[in-house]
Image: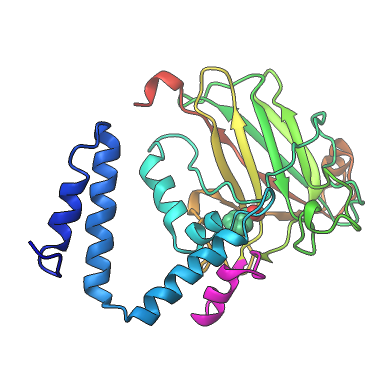
Amino acid sequence: MDFNEETALDAVLASFADTPDPRLREILAGVTRHLHALVRDVRPTLAEWEQAVGYLTAVGRKCDDTRQEFVLLSDVLGVSMLVEAINDDEHGTEGTVLGPFHMTESPRRELGDSISEVGLERPCVVTGTVTDLAGRPVAGATVDVWQCDEDGFYDVQRPDVQPPGNGRGLFTADDAGEFWFRTVVPSHYPIPTDGPVGRLLDASRRHPFRPAHVHLIVDADGYEPVTTHLFVADSPYLDSDAVFAVKQSLVRDFAVSEDASAAAAHGVTVPFRRAHFDVQLVPREETS
Ligand code: BEZ
Ligand code: FE
């Protein structure tokens, strides 16, 4: 039988029918069905198809050990967050994208340390408690945090201005599950736009900005780790995150405090900003 618009889908599905791994067979069939449906729907010209292949080739060429343009593409298409949503447990603190800036290990720090190694002119204190679903403290949970500076840059983006590890910290919650650290309030910032994903945003008149946030990975023995963000409530772009990662449950006020005794207790000066973020972990055996 000729391979034409009517027979194409069945012919390709049949070619994968003997794939021994059932999950791989299911995925290959899904990719085939959806890709064929896309082509039948959009009806690209040959030149447009070549352009599509060229685009994906450029995305691949932009990838190296420190840059993952395919993940960035998945992020701006909302696919990373869709995968996250499909896999997120409905209990516990909600998860969001990991993002590309967790490429270096966070330095171990003591509770209360500053993660800003370049000064704390406008200090901020972040506090929180790690608990289980019943609200019982998870003592000794590890809390890995990383964020950009007040100008919207991660340490790896401006090594001439920020020492490695600036804006990062690996903390261990105390016996009450509590953690706290000093920092600066991160800025909103653009995702990397110097590659094919930037061209896509430009061509579609989309802005590249993410609202201000602190990244966290919280983990403890016997619990599912959660990769999430703490968003700054008065940040621009909270309702138009370039990578669709905002969840209302993760947005917190970073209120200005003039409380001199609270400032002294946390080793900062007034005025300072403070945010509180409790993290609920899901026990391992409760997830399917
Ligand atoms: C980030 O928050 O670090 C990030 C997430 C997705 C794409 C680019 C940056
Ligand atoms: Fe980020």
Location of residue 33 by image quarter: bottom left
Residue 115 can be seen, yes or no:
yes
Split into 4 quadrants, where in the image is the C terminus?
top left
Q: Which residues are magenta?
A: 191-209
Residue at position x 82%, y 43% in the image: 165
Q: Reply above or below: 115 against 162.
A: above
Query: At 67% across and 70% down in the image, what residue appears?
Result: 194
Q: Position of residue 54 (x, y in %)?
A: 49, 71
Task: Examine the structure image and report whether residue 283 is included in the region drawn in magenta.
Answer: no
Q: Is residue 48 left or right of residue 224?
A: left
Left or right placement of residue 256 versus residue 128 in this view:
right
Q: Residue at x 36, y 44 (%)?
A: 86
Is 177 situated left or right of 180 in this image?
A: left
Of the pair 257 and 11, the residue shown nearer to us: 11
Work out which residue is located at the far left of the displayed protein and give it.
1
- Image quadrant of residue 231? bottom right
211 in relation to 248, above or below:
below
Residue 177 image point, x, y percent: 64, 24
The one of 203 and 19 positioned closer to us in this rendering = 19
Q: Quadrant of the N terminus?
A: bottom left
The residue drawn where x is 51% and y is 17% is 222
Residue extending furthest toward the front: 1
In this picture, residue 37 sits left or right of residue 75 = left
